[in-house]
Image (cartoon, grey):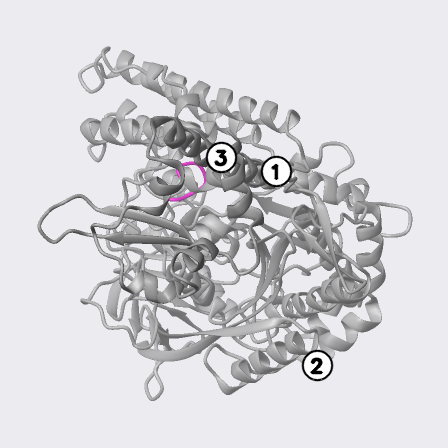
């Protein structure tokens, strides 16, 4: 033991200039290696101070020094092995304890490192949370009537049709504003195909043997050519209107439908007429709905979809060349707008049967002798458009964002259609940027501000952006707030939104003031806010493709004057003066309130730890559809048993509905039990919430054939509403009804709901397998 102790002392505390020397030599003829370990001071003694020479001259016959010193006995070798093993164990334990302490260090707290008396904060948890009341107060202080009025004046333009120099100039103004506010900005360029009126020729109509009329208004994406047929008055051209005509046994084949503007979009009117084999559609503004004079032209589009119809499902980047393809939403019949005077002149000369009650003061539908000729010669052109963006980045989940958008273009002045919304967009960007820069507000998530072009042609700019970045947007953009047409009056307030956002909308209505003494809720929805304020999201809203095409929860809203639409949309009369006439010159004040409402929703979504979305709202909607489908399936089985045998059951649809209900309740329980300071847990829960809307998009239909794939809020044969209508057709043994097709669509809708429930449940081991 004394010898071992002496050796260890020399190795670790040894004499000056001593070192340990290992010499490994390999016998070239296969003998085992020999090991020589010497202490340099002892080697010097052995060789007379010439340690180096001694090493150079040693040979394989020399007896190793260790053996000479201690003797190669088992006892000494055991001492050395035990010592080396002990040193190894001590080193391993020290390393393990150091590594373990690092792993146990907290990751959600704020730590500080000091270097030369300078503290550097490293934030690994949530951003410092400003009290929500302070956030609301700051926004109310920043958005002022005077600043809004100034921006309205700066952005007013008499001509900014999509792709025009006026449109580009406005886009430059918007991006300049964003840069002034310190935002990161970028643009998104597209080359899109649109239809414009003929540059050298004209569109025309000739009623009976009268004079030729040449309307200056037009409908983009109409079929071109000439149609001749008898006029049939069809009210607003809604499905119910045409159903009434069908019930009257009126033949609609090859008829030229004369319909009023309003209630539904131009595209829906034309699509409905095409379903009954009409040859053309003429749309006029009836004086009962529009007080715009007898000669004011109407403008619009008739694409039953959104975006560039010649690149359905993919973006129009940089003259992108794809195999020739067209959207299934392009009509194959002619469509043309006419003035009030032209429409009333035709109505007064119609004969035939009496109109249904409530269809108008001139009560004839038209007969076979009321022949009209319609000629459309629109020109397909390519335009370069630019979307403009700015972003305020979040401090925790910067890659998750709410998008606030407004269209920038218009057919004419477009003050109500685009100028007010663009001004509110710019003012919100300024106000929130100022809150972040100067008031210490730190949003958890990002806010993207978007100025779209070609909105009047069917939300082309917004849809092309969605198509270009769909795979990432559907995972990261959690809400879209639309600012188009937000001020069209002052006597009412309407909101169209995804059911996920209804509770958030209700809270915003409570907290945003209409005047000093009343909130928006108490002013417009005191008794039953849902029936008084909520309305369906219209297909011609830019929020619709975000919701029904991309699966992003969306909201659109507007101040309005009553039951009728703002009469100056889609005309050259959409000026500030005319908007003042229906708002008592309160446009800046109403724009500020609209900005506060939109800002409240956006800020709440980026302020809270968890996204404020009510998953249970969809329970009610799904159950109402299931109840209707169940009743109608039984009716068909009772009245047409050969079409749907008793073996077809709604059991699986009911179970899928139950799975969604249980999954949403389970997530609500997870939220109640979650630690809001756990950043990763909050992110996981928010991601589960974000999948809901996206998973209601049917995976069984093509974006080309049915771009609005949402089974609850979309459009097409895959929706639950379409299943209900299909059952009605089966009940009456309609020849167009297809029982086999219904069964396929029924199965696909059922599994889409179950898939949404599975995704909402989260982990694979948490899935509801009852179905």
Which circle, 1 or 2, is nearer the viewer?
A: 1
Quote the CA–CA distance across marks 3 and 1. 35 Å
Whether residue 456 is visible, yes or no, is yes
Q: Sequence order check: which comes first, mark 3 or mark 1? A: 3
Residue on which disc 2 sits: 154
- Residue closest to the eye, 516 or 376: 516
Q: In the structure shown, which secondary structural element does the residue marked by tag 3 occupy?
A: helix
**Residue 322 appears at what percent x and percent y?**
22, 68
Residue at 71% in and 36% down: 529
Residue 101 is labelled as 1
Residue on which disc 3 sits: 4
**In the picture shown, does residue 644 fall above or below 131?**
above
- Residue closest to the eye, 114 or 767: 114
Q: Residues within 10 Å of mark 2 (few under 14, many from 20)?
A: few
Quote the CA–CA distance across marks 2 and 3. 92 Å
Whether residue 367 is visible, yes or no, is no
**In the picture shown, does residue 630 fall above or below 303?**
above
Q: State yes or no: residue 714 in magenta.
A: yes
Q: Which residues are magenta?
A: 711-715
Q: State yes or no: residue 731 in magenta.
A: no
Q: Quadrant of residue 704?
A: bottom left
Please indicate whether residue 119 sits to the left or right of residue 342 in the image. Answer: right
Which circle, 3 or 1, is nearer the viewer?
A: 3
**In the picture shown, does residue 726 fall above or below 31?**
above
Q: Sequence order check: which comes first, mark 2 or mark 3? A: 3
Residue sitting farthest toward the left: 29
- Residue closest to the eye, 517 or 375: 517
Q: In the structure shown, which secondary structural element does the residue marked by tag 2 occupy?
A: helix
Q: Sequence order check: which comes first, mark 1 or mark 2? A: 1
Residue at 55% in and 27% down: 667
């Amino acid at each position: 033991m004394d010898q071992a102790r002496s050796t260890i002392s020399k190795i670790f505390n040894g004499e000056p200039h001593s070192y340990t020397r290992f010499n490994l030599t390999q016998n070239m003829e296969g003998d085992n290696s020999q090991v020589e370990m010497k202490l340099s001071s002892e080697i010097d003694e052995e060789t007379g101070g010439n340690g180096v020479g001694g090493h150079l001259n040693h040979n394989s016959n020399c007896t190793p020094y260790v053996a000479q010193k201690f003797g190669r006995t088992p006892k000494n070798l055991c001492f050395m092995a035990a010592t080396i093993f002990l040193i190894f164990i001590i080193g391993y334990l020290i390393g393990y304890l150091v590594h373990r302490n690092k792993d146990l260090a907290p990751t959600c707290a704020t730590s500080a490192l000091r270097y030369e008396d300078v503290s550097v904060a490293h934030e690994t948890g949530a951003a410092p949370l400003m009290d929500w009341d302070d956030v609301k107060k700051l926004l109310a202080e920043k958005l002022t009537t005077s600043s809004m009025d100034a921006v309205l004046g700066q952005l007013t333009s008499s001509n900014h049709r999509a792709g025009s120099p006026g449109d580009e100039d406005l886009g430059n103004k918007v991006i300049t504003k964003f840069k002034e506010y310190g935002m990161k900005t970028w643009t998104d360029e597209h080359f899109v195909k649109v239809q414009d009126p003929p540059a050298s020729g004209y569109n025309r109509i000739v009623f009976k043997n009268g004079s030729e009329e040449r309307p200056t208004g037009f409908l983009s994406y109409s079929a071109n050519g000439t149609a001749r047929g008898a006029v049939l008055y069809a009210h607003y051209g809604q499905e119910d209107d045409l159903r009434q005509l069908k019930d009257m046994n009126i033949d609609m084949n090859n008829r030229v439908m004369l319909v009023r503007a309003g209630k539904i979009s131009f595209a829906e009117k034309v699509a409905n007429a095409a379903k009954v084999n009409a040859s053309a559609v003429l749309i006029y503004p009836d004086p009962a709905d529009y007080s715009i004079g007898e000669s004011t032209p109407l403008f619009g589009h008739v694409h039953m979809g959104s975006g560039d119809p010649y690149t359905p499902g993919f973006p129009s980047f940089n003259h992108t060349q794809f195999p020739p393809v067209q959207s299934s939403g392009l009509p194959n019949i002619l469509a043309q707008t006419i003035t009030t005077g032209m429409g009333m002149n035709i109505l007064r000369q119609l004969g035939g049967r009496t109109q249904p009650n409530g269809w108008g003061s001139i009560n004839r539908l038209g007969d076979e002798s009321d022949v009209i000729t319609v000629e459309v010669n629109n020109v397909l052109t390519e335009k370069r458009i630019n979307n403009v963006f700015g972003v305020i980045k979040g401090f925790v989940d910067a890659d998750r964002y709410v998008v606030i958008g407004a269209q920038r273009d218009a057919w004419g002045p477009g003050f109500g259609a685009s100028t007010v919304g663009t001004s509110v967009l710019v003012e919100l960007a300024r106000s929130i940027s100022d809150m972040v820069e100067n008031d210490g507000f730190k949003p958890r998530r990002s806010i993207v501000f978007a100025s779209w072009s070609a909105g009047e042609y069917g939300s082309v700019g917004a849809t092309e952006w969605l198509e270009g970045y769909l795979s990432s947007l559907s995972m990261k953009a959690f809400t879209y707030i639309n600012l188009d047409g937000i001020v069209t009056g002052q006597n009412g307030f309407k909101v169209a939104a995804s059911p996920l956002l209804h509770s958030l909308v209700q809270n915003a209505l409570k907290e945003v003031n209409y005047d000093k003494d009343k909130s928006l809720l108490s002013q417009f929805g005191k008794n039953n806010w849902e029936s008084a304020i909520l309305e369906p999201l219209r297909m011609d809203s830019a929020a619709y493709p975000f919701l029904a095409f991309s699966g992003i929860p969306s909201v659109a809203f507007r101040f309005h004057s009553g039951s009728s639409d703002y009469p100056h949309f889609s005309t050259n009369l959409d000026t500030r003066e005319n908007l003042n006439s229906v708002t008592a010159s309160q446009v800046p004040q109403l724009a500020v309130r609209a900005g506060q409402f939109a800002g409240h929703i956006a800020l709440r979504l980026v302020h809270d730890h968890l996204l404020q979305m009510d998953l249970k709202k969809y329970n009610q909607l799904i159950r109402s559809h299931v109840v209707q489908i169940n009743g109608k399936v039984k009716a068909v089985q009772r009245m047409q048993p050969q079409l749907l045998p008793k073996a077809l059951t709604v059991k699986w649809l009911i179970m899928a509905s139950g799975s969604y209900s249980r999954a949403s309740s389970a997530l609500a329980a997870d939220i109640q039990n979650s630690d809001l300071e756990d950043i990763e847990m909050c992110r996981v829960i928010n991601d589960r919430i974000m999948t809901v809307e996206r998973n209601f998009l049917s995976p069984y239909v093509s974006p080309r054939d049915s771009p609005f794939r949402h089974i609850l809020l979309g459009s097409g044969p895959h929706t639950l509403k379409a299943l209900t209508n299909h059952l009605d057709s089966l009940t009456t043994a309609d020849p167009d009804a297809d029982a086999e097709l219904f069964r396929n669509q029924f199965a696909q809708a059922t599994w889409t709901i179950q898939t949404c429930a599975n995704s909402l449940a989260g982990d694979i081991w948490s899935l509801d397998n009852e179905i």
